Amino acid sequence: MNAANDKAGAILVAENVTMRFGGVTAVSDLSFALRKGAIGGVIGPNGAGKTTVFNVLSGFYTPQEGEITLLGKNIKGLQPYEICKMGMAPTFQNIRLSPQMTVLENIMVGCHVRRHGRWWSAALGLPGFYREERELQAKAAALAEKVNLDKQLGETAGSLPYGAQRRLEIARALATEPALLLLDEPAAGMNPQESIELMRFIGKIRDEFNLSILLIEHDMKVVMGVCEYIWVMEYGALIAEGLPDQVRNNPLVIRAYLGEDVITNA
Amino acid sequence: MRFDRNTFLTLAAMLVFGLILWQSEKFLGDYQIYIAKLIFINIILALSLNLIYGFTGLFSLGHAGFIAIGAYVAAICILPQAQKEMMWILEPIAWPASHIFTPFWVAVLGAGLFAGIFAFFIAVPVLKLGDDYLGMATLAFAEIIRVLIVNATPITNGSLGIKGIPNHSTLIVCYIWALFTLVILARLCYSNFGNILRCIRDNEIAASVMGINVFHYKVLSFCVGAFFAGIGGALLGSHLSTIDPKMFNFLLTFNVLMFVVTGGLGSLTGSILGATIITILLEWLRALEEPMNLGFIELPGIPGMRMVVFSVVLLAIILKRREGIMGTRELTWNRIFAFFSRHKA
């Protein structure tokens, strides 16, 4: 077994996870382990169950079977906000920002989870509240600088171009101080040039914030450059895993993506 | 708190306005003062609903219920014992209600707390619903509160209502409570907690994965809104000096909803403007229902004319500014200064 898939040094472990909707098994018997500090990718063609995996990991679905462990603690059955508190922050395939709120305010939403003061300290205007509020603002502004949005702090999120909104969403996720970033199709809707830049950016923030990152992605080309370990799904099951080069040349993977004929003609 | 130009200006404006109101009896008639008090009470009601609907996006139609609770609690608290025993003719007044007698400010706070606690019990089952279903459920709860008031005769005097409530809500008292509401809600809505509420409004799923306990903050917003609705109700009861269950039907909720929507959902200053403009308009248009002598022709008074014109004005406002007068923006000192410097140039 590869070092990247070793359970001992893993940050996120899924063991025999099965998720059924009525008679449909969207994910069956999925097991993987993401090493601390690694960038891993879950890929697969349309309908492979990638989004279900995302929803299971982020806590929107509770799988019928199997266990999920984050930083050594079982997170199966926890609410999304509890999982976020434990150190996992997801971003979405379709960007979910508050379009009327400014860039700074959007990032500050992410800061909330690490806040100590309670709401009534805001209502009563206690001194500690103002201090913490300024700290959060400074933290959000610093994060905006990391994602090259420091010039647009006061602009509404809805007015930003698509790529900037993507970076803003990542900044908001970083504001929760995660140990693991879960990115659902971050390159969706981007042209090749933009997605290359995004992947470079993802690699950069991993080094800078000392993170582990799990990408869930449809496009194989996008993940090859940045991921250190890849799991390939088809019809809800794992069909291959390994280093990018191993996966790229795996006939099962090629068949899943391109169909039967390619193999026989090759 | 940082003491900068804007804080200074706000405090100065509050003080100057308070002083003007304090001296208002010298230059305002009784009727104008009556309307001014109603404006402040309506501002409190509009602000409280704006927190629930405008900032948190909970379509709640239960406001009249919380206002009713506030009005009744405060009325029972400030009525002298002898007067209560005289008025409860259907059934004698029950024990705790009969002996309570508190200063007005305690009664108002108590009214708010009662409404807030009641809202908490409603919130837990109801806030699992979303959008229109939430509207239906809260509307139903407001009616339940009204029916409870009609039937809890030993405490509320049933459908006879309560008369002769001491009028403690003077203009300056209403002003101070409206300021209190505004300051607390502004602090809440324009801190990071306000960002969270707006994030829940815009995208509940995003809020939950950002570590926000969405249900907790929905309940919080609902209860704080109800708390201030209770305060508004307490002032309203004391202001009108007579309350009965029929007053608190769903039309009251829609009035408040109208202030909020006209002013702009998610704008505190918008709610203040909306409540002020509509309250004045409703009174001012009464002139239309009186017989008019235009010199060459004499028009008889048409009852209901007021509401026709009022509806047209409302339609015009909503068509002209689809998001209300202010939208989600606020009227801030910076904006005012920017406006004047632009027009000077």
Image (cartoon, rainbow, N blue to C red):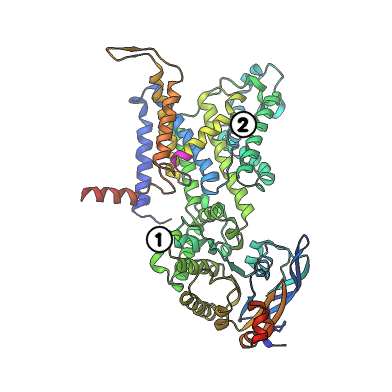
> What range is drawn magenta here?
B261-266
User: As drawn, which residue projects farthest toward the left?
Assistant: B345
Residue A20 included in the magenta stretch of the image: no
Between residue B27 and residue A15, name the one nearer to us: A15
Element class at badge 1: loop
Residue A37's spot in the image, x, y percent? 61, 81
Residue B73, label in figure: 2
Residue at the image point whose x is 46% and y is 63% from the top: A137
Residue B210's spot in the image, x, y percent? 58, 63
Q: On the image, numbered disc 1 is attached to which residue?
A: A154
- Corner quadrant of residue B176: top left
Quadrant of the frame with the N terminus of chain A: bottom right
Amino acid type for the residue under numbered disc 1: Gly
Residue at the image point whose x is 46% and y is 73% from the top: A146
The lab-note entry on whether marks 2 and 1 share a chain reads no
Amino acid type for the residue under numbered disc 2: Val
Distance from disc 2 to disc 1, alpha carbons, whole Å, reads: 45 Å
* Label 2 CA crowd tier, 10 Å (few <14, some 14–19, many 20+): many
Residue at the image point whose x is 55% and y is 78% from the top: A222
Left or right: where A85 falls relative to A101: right
- Corner quadrant of residue B75: top right
